C-alpha cells in the first residue's frame, strides 16, 4: 500500500529532474601561454585591455531536447586578460608597470562559443579575435590575431568543460600574439 502512494511522488520527481535543462554558464578567462620567447632585452610597457563591445554573453549551449541557455564571460574580463598579458610579458623578460613610456593595448575584438548539433554529431565551436598595439613615441606596432577551436562532444558541456574550452581558445590566440616575431623585434628594438 505504501509503495503505491510513493509512485506519484517518484513520477513527479522524475519529470522535474528530466525536464530541467542545462544551467546558464558563467566563465572566468584564465588563459595560460605555455611558450613565449625569453627576450635578451626589452622595453618596459604599460598594459591596458579594451573590450569595446562589452557584450558578456558569448554564446549558448543546448541539451538534446533543445533547452538552450546562455554562456557568459564575467564582467572582470579586462582584469583577467590584463593579468594573463602581464604574466606572459614578465616571463618573456618584459617589465610591466604604470610608469613605462610605451603603451601596449590588447583589444578583445570578438569571442564566440556555441554547441552545434545536427542530430547525430555534437560539436563545440569557438572563435576569438584580438588586436595588439604598442606605441612607443614615434614607433608603433600593430598585429591582429585569431584562433578557432572545434571539439566533438557526447553530451551538453558542463560549466567546467566550457571553461576549459574557452580558456584553451584564449590561450591559443595569446600564444599567436606573443610569439609574433615582429612583436618581439619591436620590444627588443625599443630597449636600445
Image (cartoon, rainbow, N blue to C red):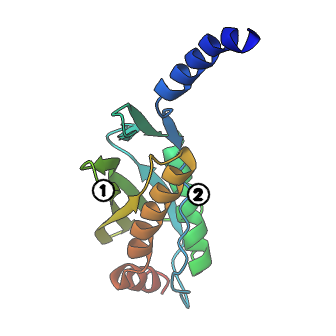
Q: Which of 181 and 11 is in front in this view?
A: 11
Residue 18 versus residue 104 in the image, above or below: above
Frontmost of labels 2 and 1 is: 1
What's the mark number on residue 190? none
Disc with the residue nearer the chain's start (2 vs 1): 2
Q: Which of 44 and 12 is in front in this view?
A: 12
Picture coordinates of residue 34, whole percent (x, y) = 55, 76
Residue under pointer 2: 83
Q: Is mark 2 on a helix, strand or loop?
A: helix
Residue shown at the point (67%, 11%) measured from the top left: 4
Q: Marks 2 and 1, Cα distance to the nearest angstrom?
A: 36 Å
Q: Is mark 1 on a helix, strand or loop?
A: loop
Q: Can residue 103 be seen in this view?
A: no
Residue shown at the point (47%, 48%) measured from the top left: 157
Q: How many labels does the image show?
A: 2
Q: Which of 20 and 68 is in front in this view?
A: 20
Q: Which of 5 and 104 is in front in this view?
A: 5
Q: Residue furthest right?
A: 2
Residue under pointer 1: 121
Left or right of residue 29, residue 154 in this image = left
Picture coordinates of residue 80, whole percent (x, y) = 55, 51
Which quadrant: the N terminus?
top right
Picture coordinates of residue 179, whole percent (x, y) = 42, 80
Query: Is mark 2 in CB contact (under 8 Å) with mark 1?
Result: no
Amino acid at each position: 500500500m505504501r509503495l503505491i502512494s510513493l509512485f506519484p511522488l517518484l513520477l513527479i520527481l522524475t519529470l522535474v529532474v528530466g525536464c530541467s535543462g542545462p544551467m546558464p554558464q558563467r566563465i572566468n578567462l584564465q588563459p595560460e601561454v605555455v611558450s613565449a620567447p625569453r627576450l635578451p632585452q626589452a622595453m618596459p610597457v604599460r598594459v591596458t585591455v579594451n573590450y569595446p563591445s562589452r557584450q558578456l554573453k558569448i554564446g549558448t549551449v543546448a541539451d538534446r531536447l533543445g533547452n538552450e541557455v546562455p554562456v557568459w564571460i564575467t564582467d572582470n574580463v579586462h582584469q583577467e586578460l590584463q593579468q594573463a598579458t602581464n604574466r606572459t610579458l614578465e616571463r618573456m623578460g618584459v617589465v610591466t608597470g604604470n610608469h613605462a613610456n610605451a603603451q601596449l593595448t590588447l583589444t578583445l575584438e570578438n569571442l564566440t562559443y556555441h554547441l552545434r548539433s545536427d542530430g547525430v554529431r555534437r560539436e563545440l565551436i569557438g572563435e576569438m579575435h584580438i588586436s595588439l598595439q604598442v606605441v612607443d613615441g614615434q614607433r608603433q606596432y600593430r598585429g591582429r590575431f585569431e584562433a578557432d577551436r572545434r571539439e566533438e562532444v557526447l553530451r551538453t558541456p558542463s560549466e567546467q568543460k566550457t571553461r576549459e574550452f574557452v580558456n584553451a581558445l584564449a590561450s591559443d590566440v595569446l600564444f599567436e600574439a606573443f610569439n609574433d616575431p615582429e612583436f618581439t623585434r619591436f620590444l627588443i628594438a625599443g630597449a636600445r
